[in-house]
Image (spheres, rainbow, N blue to C red):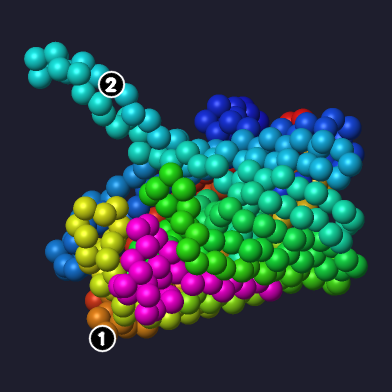
Amino acid sequence: MKRIVNTLMMMAICLTGSAQTSSADSTKTSRLTVGGYGEANFTRNYYSDHVSRYSQPEEHKNDPSHGRFDIPHAVIYLGYDFGKGWSFGTEIEFEHGGAGIAYEKEDEEGGEWEQETEKGGEVELEQFWLQKSFARWANLRVGHIVVPVGLNNAHHEPLSYFTVYRPEGENTIMPSTWHQTGVSFWGRHGKFRYEAQFLAGLNADQFTNVGWIHKGHKSPLEFDVANKYATALRIDNYSIPGLRIGLSGYYGHSIGNTYPNDANGTGATNKGKVAIGAIDFTYKAHNWIVRGQADYGYLSNASELKYMYNRLNSKSPFKHSAFVSSNAYAMGVEAGYDIFSQIQSMRQQGERLYVFGRYEAYNPYASDTKGVSYDYTAVKRMAVGLNYHPISQIVIKAEYSQRFLKSQYNNEPSINIGVAYEGFFL
């Protein structure tokens, strides 16, 4: 067993690189902080991957299963304390192995040189900020920052959830990890931690029927358009030992926050107000870990999005065909018990084995727009599995999960296995 664990640990380090969490160890003496997190996963999906599996479910009821290996996130964190309250932080993320383009000489095409996409992932700068700390209760951060709305965005590292992939509901309806350029004021006072942010608004051109605002923070341009603005708030309470309860919210305008600015079109008469409210908690005590969240979102002028200028232009890099819902929701709860806590030898060695279960329900298209429905977006999901921690910074995960869709569609079972780590190296 130890040989297998050691092999998997080496795979995690080789495949995912360095890691980060949100703050450095307070006992460290070096001004430089180096860390990160990463994960490598295997999935076998026992349902069809055909593009028409929802429009023609009966035709794909008996389609073969399909599998994949994936590196969802490999993150490198660098931070530096300049002194006198000034500090710097940056987080570079390679999603799904990163992206790559290369030139190749095609012998089968007469030796022509061609530029080809070698890898379909992404490389993103998730954080890049400068901070001035005036006191424990007053810190000002400016730059590219994480927007901590919902449980998943505030606690997105792989040791912060039991499932192999990030919790599906919040990951569907909101950006994950949600990061934008802006200004943040945060601090701690007593049993509370609080944060207020000023940001550019989301881009309604990026909203979809199956993802609601999930891609709204992304820009296909070399800059983020800031014709409209938004605010995000979060407060966490730690009054009860072992329990953290968080409230978070977001409000901003999204229509017209695009390039070029269509002064006389839809953006001039509609605002596309995005409002999100979320509550979440984490309980860690008595060998139990229990987490839960509930999120509800509202989008005004949703029926107008399909007719916006950039959606009507077939050459633009935005979505063109589907309506977007005015409402979306996600709720979920998971609980795990450390059975190694009852085995003295395992407990003394610091090993943990959580048996967990998770249930969630979500829908990015919770209200029909102009009478058009996409019933397959309403999902209930169940997962059961194990999390094995040979040491505190590494986890090996295994789960069986199933999505339950409305009766006219086929349910979607799968098996997922992953290895992940997070921590600081310096």
> What residue do we see at 47% from left, 42% from top?
95
> What residue do we see at 57% from left, 46% from top?
126
Question: What is the distance, in whole Å, between disc 1 and disc 2 at their CAs?
Answer: 48 Å
Whether residue 39 is visible, yes or no, is: no
**Looking at the image, is mark 1 or mark 2 nearer the viewer?**
2
Task: Give the numbered dot on residue 371.
Answer: 1
- Identify the element where label 2 is drawn: strand
* Residue identified by numbered label 2: 103
Amino acid type, label 2:
Tyr
The C terminus lies in which quarter of the figure? top right
In the image, which residues are magenta? 247-272
In-image side of 262 versus 245 (left or right)? left
> What residue do we see at 82% from left, 36% from top?
82
* Label 1 Cα crowd, 10 Å radius (few <14 / some 14-19 / many 20+): few
Q: Residue furthest front?
A: 264
In-image side of 94 versus 262 (left or right)? right
- Identify the element where label 1 is drawn: loop
In-image side of 165 versus 233 (left or right)? left
- In the image, 268 versus 113, the foreground residue is 268
Question: Does residue 104 show up magenta in the picture?
Answer: no
Tell me residue 400's x, y (percent): 47, 57
Tell me residue 146's x, y (percent): 62, 54
Task: Give the numbered dot on residue 256.
Answer: none
